[in-house]
Amino acid sequence: MTGGNFFKRIFVLLTFFILPVYGNPSNSLDTPDIKEKSKAKINLQIGTSFGRISIRPVVKPVSEIKRKNLIKQKLDFSCGSAAVATIFNFYLGEKVTEEQVINGLFAVGNVQKIIKRKGFSLLDIKKFAQAMGYKAAGYRTSLEGLVSLNRPAIVTLVIGKYKHFVVFKGVYKGRVFIADPSLGNTILSAEEFKKMWYKNIALVIYSEDTNKKFEITKEEKIWVDTHTLRQSMYNRLVQSFRNFNEF
């Protein structure tokens, strides 16, 4: 094992074991009891008594990585508006709040239908994006087709009997990276994603003037190395959606 790979694995294990525990998706990552400094130093003893060294690597808490470039949903029904706000803020460069998106979705959508279904639809989101001057296109495609679009896309995941909007970011080493408005940035295996992806439908919001990519960060790519340790985390966490009406 090379020195670079060794320190990478040390970094991964450190960030994995300080992952906060979530009991409910409504718990905010920003609550005072789990706030963390953006940089932390931990003493590590490496080697044997014949040649031991002490290092203090700077590591980022996983909670910081999970909420990077992401708008968290504040309401039970607002995963759609938070997904839209995530794309607008971190891909299109349009500074909008989740509340502004919610107001805009109500303005362009059928209020009675929104109330009845207890949430917004992809059609509402498409109308809102177009009203904001952006292009919006819906696709029914495969995972490979989704990757070929080379843009972030809003997709619906079926969790139990509920539907939940997330932002598809891309695929790396056979893992699908998503920005989840409730759980934060996370990964799924390609098989898991395909099983949960509702009717293979995706909505892309874009501008011809926008060449910026919604990239998977280096920190997120390192997660893939510990996927066998964390592979059941997403499915374990999403069980808390059983009391939610997510559309």
Image (cartoon, grey):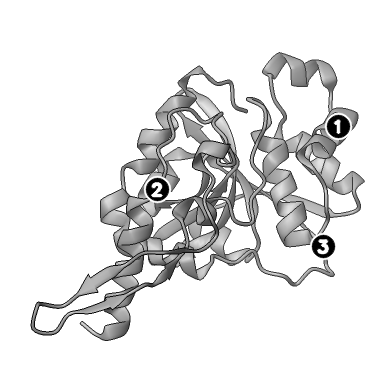
Q: Residues within 10 Å of mark 1 (few under 14, many from 20)?
A: few
The nearer-to-camera label among 2 and 1 is 2
Residue 111, position as x, y percentages in the image: 84, 20
Is 172 or 5 nearer to us in this picture?
5
Residue 190, position as x, y percentages in the image: 40, 53
- Tell me the quadrant of the picture where the N terminus can be found: bottom left
Tags 2 and 1 touching, CB below 8 Å = no
Name the residue that disc number 1 marks: 103
State the separation of the CA atoms marked 2 and 3.
36 Å
Is 16 or 148 nearer to us in this picture?
16
Q: Residue at x 78, y 34 (%)?
A: 124
Q: Residue at x 78, y 60 (%)?
A: 92
State the separation of the CA atoms marked 3 and 1.
22 Å
The nearer-to-camera label among 3 and 1 is 1
SS at mark 1? helix
The nearer-to-camera label among 2 and 3 is 2
Q: Which mark is residue 207?
A: 3
Name the residue that disc number 2 marks: 19
The amino acid on which the numbered mark 3 sits, given as a three-letter code, is Ser
Q: Residues within 10 Å of mark 3 (few under 14, many from 20)?
A: few
Q: Is residue 146 left or right of residue 135?
A: left
Q: Is residue 83 left or right of residue 43?
A: right
The amino acid on which the numbered mark 1 sits, given as a three-letter code, is Asn
Q: Is residue 176 left or right of residue 10?
A: right
